[in-house]
Image (tube, rainbow, N blue to C red):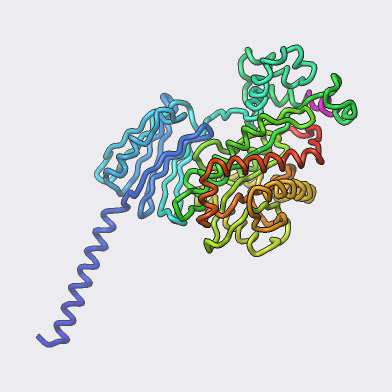
Amino acid sequence: MTPKERERRLLLQSGTALLLLGAAQIARGATILAVRVWPAQDYTRVTIESDGPLQTKQIFVPDPPRLAVDISGIDLDPALRELVAKVRPDDPYISGVRIGQNAPDVVRLVLDLKQPTRPQVFSLTPVAAYQYRLVLDLYPTQPPDPLAALIADRLRDEQGTASAGADADNDPLGAWMASRARKPAAVPDTDGATTSIAQALRESKATAGNRSKIGAAGANSPDRVKRLIIVAIDPGHGGEDPGATGPSGTHEKDVVLKIAFLVRDRINASSVDGDPMRAYLTRDGDYFVPLQVRVQKARRVQADLFVSIHADAFLTPQARGASVFALSQGGATSATARWMANSENRSDQIGGVNVRAKDAQVQRTLLDMSVSAQIRDSLKLGNAVLGEIGDVGRLHTGRVEQAGFAVLKAPDIPSVLVETGFISNPEEEAKLDSDAYRQKLADAIVSGILRYFAKNPPAARNRVM
């Protein structure tokens, strides 16, 4: 056999082997790499990660509630079976998981549910550290009203110090809530708020509006009407989106949630000119919240301020120092601000958003409304917070920066984003992992908020969401 004939035979053999390998890969389909479950009161997410796209069809059965998903082109393997043990007993939505080989190339996944839900099933293409993901989101059919929960929480605090009659003199809305406490819950409106709650807010607007007329009477005047001051605290990232990760493996999503809890406790123990304060967390556990939803949540509770808490990473470990950012309608105030905004705005891609479920109308509304007044007030809030944080540690820059952060786009709420430090810097990662340092940061953030309110008293509420 000549050298050319041997070369030709080798090429043919190689081509045959490649064809056989390709056929085997096609027959095998995708391989399951990991399964994850993210339970929360807002919703529970189930994620199935694979090395290729998964073909699915799903059926929702309302009675008893369960979601069945058929996944084609795969065999039941140990990685998928792990899903059964990953469901926690306290999961608000899933009571159990059943998995079986429904056909030679079809695996059936059944989620038995604790309550009626609105399931969303969608796929995500590879991004960041993730490959292909099949996502099953389970939302309640009747979500709770967060504003009513804040008011009820305030009433519980005051019951030990004041009678319902005394509350009625100072807080018409609170008294109304107390009078309804033993009555059946109202039917939710289409926007999620209960009809009776919304009506009470409308009826109380006129009373709350009298505040400007009697403000000179002082905080302790019997004629003064109290109102609840709400600060939305937004711990960045969560769930499928870990945020930045430090050299020692500290995740941004965990650090900022711990800081947010400390800020919440301090706000709930504070007041402004005699008015009680309440913090509302856009997430209170390890789950993902899309950027647009964080803004919607703050507007739904009629927040007076919005403070997003982060601990980002940079390209080099030398970057250090805390920063405060406000929204910009134009360009960013620095290259770093632009880089940070682009980094934070990728959160939806990594966390995983069902694009088909996005409310385009709401997006257009947020973009069309003027935010010039919001930016002006946000800069005032940012300067107050920055001044306090500067007493705790090093600042990355001595001014409030501006960029197009998606999470700061509530047109009617002064909003800032606080980068508590660079988690990519080993020294700052160690500080952020310290409870003592987080306590100082929380003290500084709340001091900045109170300092802002001292010069910019909250106005009477003039909107109902």
Residue depicted at x 63% and y 12% = 182
255 vs 199, nearest the viewer: 255
Residue 200 spot, x, y in % from top left:
74, 23
Is residue 376 in the magenta section? no
Give the quadrant of residue 397. Answer: bottom right
Residue depicted at x 71% and y 26% = 198
The N terminus is located in which quarter?
Answer: bottom left
Residue numbers of the magenta segment: 203-210
279 vs 118, nearest the viewer: 279
Q: Is residue 42 visible?
A: yes
> In the shown orientation, is residue 351 left or right of residue 96?
right
369 vs 401, nearest the viewer: 401
Give the quadrant of residue 399. Answer: bottom right
> In the shown orientation, is residue 163 left or right of residue 39?
right
Q: Is residue 371 visible?
A: no
For residue 70, above or below residue 217 = below
For residue 30, above or below residue 164 = below
Residue 311 spot, x, y in % from top left:
57, 50
Residue 59 spot, x, y in % from top left:
41, 36
For residue 47, above or below residue 142 = below
State the predominant SS element of the stretch in magenta: helix
Is residue 209 in the magenta section? yes
